[in-house]
Image: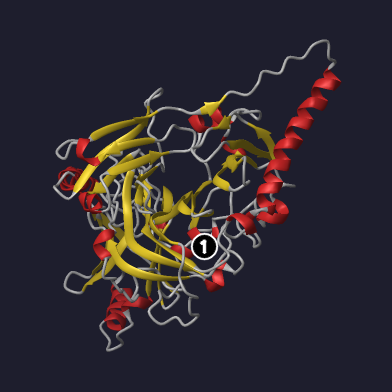
Amino acid sequence: MFTKRHICTFVILFFGALLFAQDSEFITGELIDSKTNEPLVFANIRIKDRALGIITNVDGSFRIPLKYKEFGDIIEISSMGYKSKEIDLNELNLLENNLLRLEPNVEVLEEVVLVSKKKTEEKKEKKEKEFRAKEIVAKAIQNISKNYPQAPYSYIGYYRDYQVESEYFANFNEAIIEVFDNGFQTNDYQNTNYKLYQYLRNTRFPMDTVGEKPYDNKKKFIPGAKIQPRRGNELLILRNMDAIRNYNVDTYSYVYQFDKDFLNNHWFQKNHDINLDEGGLYSIAISKRTPDHLIFGTILISKASFAIYKFDYEVFDRSEVSRSNATYQILKKEVEPLFEIRVGYNGYQGLMYPDYISFSNRFTAFGPAIFRVEKLTLNALENFLVVDFSSEPDEKNVQKMSKYELSYNEKPIRIKRIEYAGKHARLYFSKAIWKNLNGKILSNNPDAMSLLKLTVNEMKDVDGNQIDVPEKFRFSQFREFFVQKVKPEVSAIPFSTKGFMNKMKPIFKDQPILRPDNFEDYWMNTPLKKIQ
């Protein structure tokens, strides 16, 4: 685990990152809601009339490369539910952080007045309203084959996976990747391929070996949920969480196969409609309650084409919630979701293309015990065995021989007396036992010392840590992909893996890296969020 020393290093590096972000190559800024001042997450900032742009981070921050001025001076800023905005790049400050605001843009639903109606009639109208919402979602699912590309296409973007532990970033991997998709009529897992143009294991953030362990549902697990083993790297795990692209295969809990299970497994209700430059959007609230979980989400659907623009989905552990009838607003204040998926698509040349996908989940991992035996050393000159503890034992139990079980080659060894000082204990034996033990350890057998085993029972250190009890850590895992450029028309993608990433290996293990001629058009949008 990373220590306070690492955290200090992180703080220094963070401010270094701020200075780096504000160099002459980028314009930096933050996008917020003009009414609430809340950051606008995953908003689009694109060069006008071009499929080239960036996505804001989870804190609303962004970096715009000055190289974009080669493609146009006007940027278009848009986010679902907000009025789009055009800004001249020349108006933005190169030396300071630019604070930009978007105005909310919603359609107020007509007020429904109920006059002299019984409760049964009210319930009937509520059911009809819910059914209409369900019909809209059903039509959106039916129209996926019409609204999304069936022919091969590709897109280039920024990928990252990282963890947050004790509110600090760790294990930060970044890459520039081109995704070659043979179209929505093909199996994404089998037929989509990837080219790695750049990879960086960002050492400005600490590395944490506990967090990097693979999920095994024992020493690393999502509390209240279970990870099913899947082949493939973190990028493939992220891809599987796009239920729109993978509408006809199994994805994740309760959504399962989007075109068959989603409608039957959830309740739907209409929110206020949303204005969009291309036309209005239905905003449909999603919910589900089970004995173990509470599920909330939102899906935005075009009124004209029934294309899905946005799909957010969150699952909460019901045992962590104080009230059984808790609303989504209460949940967000009380607990973090077990997992959360955000998927965004945007229209281009009459079809919907990926904009971003984000998948995060909580997990618990067990690391080494804080208080443990670190080493056994035989002192042949003074005739005792040295036990090195990782921390100082509580003197109440450290000299009790009943706490120690020592054996050699599974045969017990009797201890005569114990002395201790600080983190070290000395075990003494009778002359006969010592002579026998010393002779075996000093033999020519290279594995002799490994046959010596010591178990220490029911002992604590001076800070109250129990011996050999693994330390528990709580992390949040994030995997995200932000599209920077769409290529709607590409030739059929070959099934040969030559030059493509090996999907069964992590992106940082012996992957081919092939940079295109226009590589400088793309960049790693490392988040600058300072986590308090």
Q: Give the mark count.
A: 1
The image quarter containing residue 267 is top right
Residue at 59% in and 69% down: 187
Find residue 208 and report its horizontal and vertical position in percent: 32, 56
Q: Is residue 263 above or below residue 189?
A: above
Residue 468 visible within the image: no
Q: Which quadrant of the figure contains the C terminus?
A: top left
Residue 383 visible within the image: yes
The one nearer the camera, 413 or 113, is 113
- Way the structure is coloured: secondary structure
The one nearer the camera, 497 or 132, is 132
Residue situated furthest bottom in the rendering: 444
From the viewer's perspective, tell me whether residue 363 is left or right of residue 424: right
Q: Is residue 272 above or below residue 163?
A: above
The image quarter containing residue 323 is top right
Q: Is residue 272 above or below residue 89?
A: above
Residue situated furthest top in the rendering: 116
Residue on which disc 1 sits: 216
- Amino acid at circle 1: Asp
Specify few, some or many for label 1: CA neighbours under 10 Å numbering under 14, 14-19, or 20 or more.
some
The one nearer the camera, 449 or 514, is 514
Residue at 24% in and 62% down: 520
Q: Which quadrant of the figure contains the N terminus?
A: bottom left
Find residue 320 and report its horizontal and vertical position in percent: 56, 36
From the viewer's perspective, tell me whether residue 324 is left or right of residue 37: right
The one nearer the camera, 411 or 76, is 76
Q: Is residue 327 above or below residue 279?
A: above
SS at mark 1? loop
The image quarter containing residue 15 is top left
Find residue 268 and report its horizontal and vertical position in percent: 69, 37
Find residue 400 and report its horizontal and vertical position in percent: 37, 53
Residue at 27% in and 66% down: 518
